[in-house]
Image (cartoon, grey):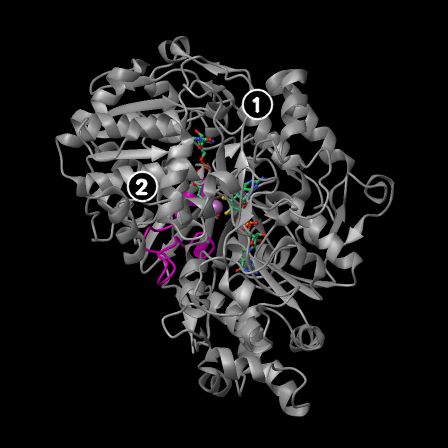
Amino acid sequence: MNRHAPEQDINEDDLQIHPPKRSAAGVKAVTVALERGWSQAGVSRTVKSMLRVNQRDGFDCPGCAWPESITGKRSPAEFCENGAKAIAEESTTRVVDAEFWARHSLAELADKTEYWLGSQGRVAEPVVIRPGETHYSPISWTDAFALIGEHVNATTPDRCVFYTSGRTANETAFMYQLFARSLGTNNLPDCSNMCHESSGSALNPTIGIGKGTVSLEDIHEAQLVFVVGQNPGTNHPRMLSALRDCKNNGGKVVAVNPLPEAGLLNFKDPQSLNGVVGGGTDIADEFLQIKVGGDLALFQALGHLLLEEEKRKPGTVVDRAFIEAQTDGFEAYAEARATLDWAETERATGLSRIEITKVAGMLAASKGTIICWALGLTQQPHSVDTLREIINLLLLQGNFGKRGAGACPVRGHSNVQGDRTMGIWEKPSEGFLAALDKEFGFTTPRVHGYDSVETQHALEKGEVDVFVSMGGNFAAAGSDTVALEEGLKKAGLTVHISTKPNRAHVVHGKTSLILPTLGRTDTDDKHPGGRQILSVEDSMSVIHSTQGRLTPISEHLLSEPVIVARMAQAVLGDNHPVDWRAMAEDYDVIRDHISRVIPGFEDFNARVRTKNGFVLPNPPRDTRTFATDIGKARFTVSPLEYLEAPAGHLILQTVRSHDQYNTTFYGLDDRYRGISEGRRVILVHEDDLGELGFEDRDMVDVISTFRGTERRADKFRLVAYPTAKGCAAAYFPEANALVHRELVARESNTPGYKAMTVRFVRHGEAAGHAEPAGTVGS
Ligand SMILES: Nc1nc2c(c(=O)[nH]1)N[C@H]1C(S)=C(S)[C@@H](COP(=O)(O)OP(=O)(O)OC[C@H]3O[C@@H](n4cnc5c(=O)[nH]c(N)nc54)[C@H](O)[C@@H]3O)O[C@H]1N2
Ligand SMILES: Nc1nc2c(c(=O)[nH]1)N[C@H]1C(S)=C(S)[C@@H](COP(=O)(O)OP(=O)(O)OC[C@H]3O[C@@H](n4cnc5c(=O)[nH]c(N)nc54)[C@H](O)[C@@H]3O)O[C@H]1N2
Ligand SMILES: [Mo]
């Protein structure tokens, strides 16, 4: 069997490169969306699903976590191109059934690309593969649950791991964590560990909540919005309408990114006349083309400049009354930022003093500033410091608890934030566990569990006997792909509760189950009380219902809550104090439990059925208070740190293309960046290519270095691209084999997916000499 993941879709001859686009969306976005829908699901399913997405009685888009308006009017088609592709991907009528598994041996599937696997259709029935077998084959649901029961009960709880990807609804997530904790483990790693964990690690101790503090209306009303380390044109397209509205109200936007992403520059709203025939809206008033990892230096410099301006014009920039009353640590912060080494700031950021000073002027003049960020800031060794520096900057001007101001981590998966609220976390708080104990009458474990990186270490050491995956594709999403796959194969049993086939199904434990489930778009009505609804939480803490309307493609699919309940019954037996069956039959029973365990969910069943759902309490936003251990918000002081590649090397970051959802691919067209029919590319600044002795389109092998060890991934095309100098970009997950699993963000343990040090050799050549690499501090 193939030891390495297949080299995805190299298509050496097909790769096409065009100049990057300077505008996002437009009419093309709608035509692409509809074409993808029709080809996957046919016209009637496509129309049915498109009309229900993000509507008040419809389903939550399985794409991103960007909110819908709860006060304003919704357009009859509240979708975007990439939301539409996510729906087409799920509502496909292609099926992966017994015949498929009989036709393709595992050895054959191991050589297929992720794109091929995902394109085969929806998993239609439960299948199993046991040691020595060459093919997956059908298994009844009853036997599948019995098999899980046998494996879990043959080992200890600390050797079982329960992973969650962020599409899981609130009700399922609550049952799933309850199951893990009933068993006796907090081994609940999730995709959030690899995503916004750094945001939570920075926000909780400084502002007393691990979530953003703005609403959608705040974005519309802000005087200044920063969009940092984020590619909204592709990953959160509906955010562009919010930024457009902000600009129409007189607001300004600053984009900070090493890549000139199309959506940051201009937006053509396909739902407005100007977007269809006009020039669209220019989004960024200032574009800071920063070096990868330079943001801490930038935010420190901005803090310094604001303090200087306050000295010049006392009482005009810094919100002294707020700082005095509501914060701690200002003096130390002001002292640390009193001086600045401009030469080092320019080197760290790749930006000029003039550019930075201009943006500081915009900040000083703004009475309401929002800073939005995503993964460009969360996946580097010093990420938590960078995010704390953002909080410093916001605190300085009192940008909490007032309209048009606040912190806005833009979350990824459509319910990743809700899953955390429901207790999917390896480090639960004592308050949460105590509430569970009280509700269910037993004692949940207090020992912290594994996060996703720790899970990877445990898998490699052979310390995991059972790995259950609620959605997701851990094999492809994690770092150090080759070692991770070897680790997964050591598990006694892997269980994948999935909608589509993926790499994790092919590199599996000694015994492996694939359990097919309903998706967001599917109706869920096989219950004594009839059709059930579920709920989700968006990036701005709004909880609302979601219900699918499409007929499931197979009669063998079970809903996620039913799967969790039956798994729990099989493992824990009939005398367990939790009534799993009642929850599976009627989701109101789950919501009643949640309403008694989790603050903010009082009267959940009634409120989830209101027109717009409800907003969770958020002290910084609602009352300008901070529920930290000291009852105040905290300024923090971090030393300057940035990424600097040694001679002959570049800093490599990984991004999503316009045609993918994490590890699933909708197609091979990264339209805005002008790259199509090939994903194994590395985008490099023209000058760097020359200095390194390469040319555009050269085929290279890539070597990453970390603390003297190397990882290698072969056959990438270099592409001359207008990225910041000294930095390169490749696609996730093709480049994951290059991420050493010990390269992580301090405190959050999030993999350093945007912080690799790499060099290139001509394809097939020996690796050459490694040089030490790392971060620079002063
Ligand atoms: N269509 C679609 N939508 C999605 C997803 C998807 O795959 N497809 N994924 C979902 C998920 S789970 C998530 S978490 C989000 C991800 O949303 P994003 O965070 O937008 O995703 P990435 O593609 O990782 O883009 C990171 C951006 O940060 C920039 N960047 C990289 N390094 C730095 C740096 O050091 N500093 C700065 N300032 N910028 C940097 C990159 O150039 C890029 O523009 O999107 C969600 N939505
Ligand atoms: N190099 C690099 N690596 C990264 C990142 C990066 O930026 N760079 N980003 C990281 C981030 S932000 C994230 S969130 C992770 C993503 O990691 P995951 O969340 O684990 O990965 P996905 O690709 O989103 O999972 C896709 C699979 O989920 C299943 N699925 C889809 N919908 C449903 C559903 O409704 N129910 C169930 N049960 N299953 C479903 C399908 O089988 C599909 O194959 O990757 C991380 N890895
Ligand atoms: Mo994510």
Q: In which quarter of the image is residue 666?
A: top right
Q: Position of residue 760 (x, y in %)?
A: 47, 50
Residue in the foreground of this view, choosing between 172 and 246: 172
**3D distance between C-alphas at marks 1 and 2:** 27 Å
Q: Which residue bears the numbered disc 2?
A: 177
Question: Is residue 749 inside the magenta stretch?
Answer: yes
In-image side of 225 versus 159 (left or right): right
In-image side of 541 versus 556 (left or right): right
**Whether residue 506 is situated above or below residue 322 in the rendered picture:** above
The quarter of the rendering in which ligand 2 is drawn is top left
Location of the C terminus by quadrant is bottom left
Q: Position of residue 538 (x, y in %)?
A: 54, 46
Residue at left offset 75%, top offset 34%: 28
* Ligand 2 contact, mark 1 (Cβ < 8 Å): no
Classify mark 2: helix, strand or loop.
helix
In-image side of 296 versus 49 (left or right): left
Question: What kind of residue is marked 1?
Answer: Arg
Residue range (magenta): 733-758
Q: Which residue bears the numbered disc 1?
A: 549
Q: Position of residue 274 (x, y in %)?
A: 85, 44
Residue at left offset 55%, top offset 44%: 65
Q: In which quarter of the image is residue 673?
A: top right
Circles 1, 2 touching at the beta carbon (< 8 Å): no
What's the mark number on residue 382? none
- Nearer-N-terminus badge (1/2): 2
Question: Is residue 59 inside the magenta stretch?
Answer: no
Q: Is residue 288 visible?
A: no
Residue in the foreground of this view, choosing between 107 and 124: 124
Classify mark 1: helix, strand or loop.
loop
Q: Position of residue 342 (x, y in %)?
A: 58, 81
Q: How crowded is mark 1: few (under 14 residues within 10 Å), some or many (20 or more)?
A: some
